[in-house]
Image (cartoon, rainbow, N blue to C red):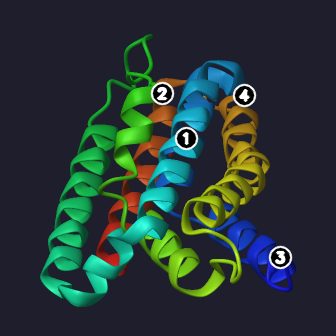
Amino acid sequence: MNELLPLLTYCALMSGTPGPNNMMLVASGAHHGYRRTLPAILGINAGGAVQTFVTCLGLGALFLAWPPAHLALKLAGTAYMLVLAWKLAGSPAAQERPPQRVGFGEAALFQAVNPKSWIKAVTIASVFMPAGMGVVAGALLVSGIGALVGFPCISMWALFGAWIGRFLKSPARRRVFNAIMAASLAVLAVTLMC
């Protein structure tokens, strides 16, 4: 497969660069540690793999043929990210309990409204599907590669959050951190709409 190196590179860039998933993982890692953030990491990975698989099977063609469907998903994703930012900004930093943890199911379902995940899935389906292979086998291959490459990339963000969490012992520091993460998520939401 001649496209393997470009596919690996693309998956690493899309998974490893800032985006809604990674901002969520930094915040979760900071408040809950890596181990308790692992279900969200696995959910993001599983949700992204399923999303890529079904996109490769033809959902991507629907977005290309009917752009309003893609716009509707972008709007829903932006709205959901803004709600997450609002919740994070208003989380009870002055209290002892951290904000609620994102679980496997919520993280997996979030991929359905995450604009960056859709961009990744549609690009993989339209650029990296292997020729000379059945559609299902090709979809399984590129989805699996995306998941394998994505896991360590997004894990680094959760580990970074866990490291930052050591410095967030006071309520004032947690408030500042939550405000920065909420603002980052809001800015990402708006920029992904452009």
User: Which element carries disc 3, helix, strand or loop?
Assistant: helix
Which quadrant, please, contains the N terminus?
bottom right
Q: Residue at x 62, y 32 (%)?
A: 29
Spatial CA distance of label 1 from label 4 is 29 Å
Identify residue for label 2. 104
Q: Which mark is residue 46?
A: 1
In the image, taking residue 85 as reference, residue 171 lies left or right, namely: right
Residue placed most toward the observer, 90 or 61: 61
CB atoms of marks 3 and 1 within 8 Å? no
Q: Nearer the viewer, mark 3 or mark 4?
A: 3
Of the numbered discs 2 and 1, the one sitting upstream in the chain is: 1
User: Which element carries disc 1, helix, strand or loop?
Assistant: helix
CB atoms of marks 2 and 1 within 8 Å? yes
Spatial CA distance of label 3 from label 4 is 39 Å
Of the numbered discs 3 and 1, the one sitting upstream in the chain is: 3
The amino acid marked with disc number 3 is: Leu
